[in-house]
Image (spheres, rainbow, N blue to C red):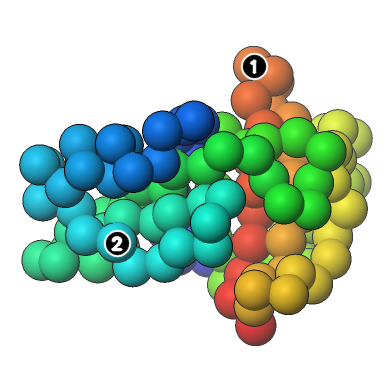
């Protein structure tokens, strides 16, 4: 299993203002689902930050996302470790397969692969 990117998720009730702020740092919008907006650096597209109001299909809002090349393998490893899975492995309508796990610090990590 290989990590493709890691992206912080910033909780925001002010998506427009937050998008404008991160725009000052050179980020541009690359995805907008209304409840989550992803911004990326035009010169380094894997440098990203997402702004999120709340998660659309999960009972918790994650603190960061880790994109892996094989989410099923990641899920098996994490599950075998005994870590707390807080959102089951599932396909989402916006084109990802993901699950969420709580890290030892209480942070929720969204682990995903694009389909």
Spatial CA span between label 1 and label 2: 30 Å
Number of numbered discs? 2
- Where in the figure is residue 23, as x and y percent of width and height? 16, 47
> Is 73 or 84 nearer to us in this picture?
84
Seen as rendered, the residue at the extreme top is: 105
Mark 1 residue crowding within 10 angstroms, few (<14) / some (14–19) / many (20+): few
Kindly identify the residue that appears in the image at 45 percent across and 63 percent down: 32
Q: Is residue 62 at all visible to an observer of this figure? A: yes
- Which residue does the numbered mark 1 point to in the structure image? 105
Sequence-earlier tag: 1 or 2: 2
- Where in the figure is residue 31, as x and y percent of width and height? 42, 66
Q: In which quarter of the image is the N terminus?
A: bottom right
| Left/right of residue 4 with respect to residue 48 in the rendered view | right
Kindly identify the residue that appears in the image at 59 percent across and 76 percent down: 114
- Which residue does the numbered mark 2 point to in the structure image? 29
- Where in the figure is residue 27, as x and y percent of width and height? 19, 53
Quarter of the rendering containing residue 43? bottom left
Kindly identify the residue that appears in the image at 21 percent across and 43 percent down: 20
- Where in the figure is residue 19, as x and y percent of width and height? 29, 45
């Amino acid at each position: 299993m290989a990590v493709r990117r890691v992206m912080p998720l910033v909780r925001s009730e002010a998506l427009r203002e937050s998008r404008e702020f991160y725009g000052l740092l050179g980020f541009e919008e690359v995805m907008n689902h209304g409840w989550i907006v992803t911004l990326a650096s035009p010169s380094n597209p894997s440098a990203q930050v997402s702004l999120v109001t709340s998660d659309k299909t999960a009972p918790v809002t994650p603190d960061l996302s880790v994109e892996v090349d094989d989410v099923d393998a990641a899920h098996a490893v994490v599950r075998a470790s005994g870590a707390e899975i807080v959102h089951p492995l599932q396909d989402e309508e916006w084109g990802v397969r993901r699950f969420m796990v709580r890290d030892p610090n209480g942070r929720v990590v969204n682990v995903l692969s694009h389909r």
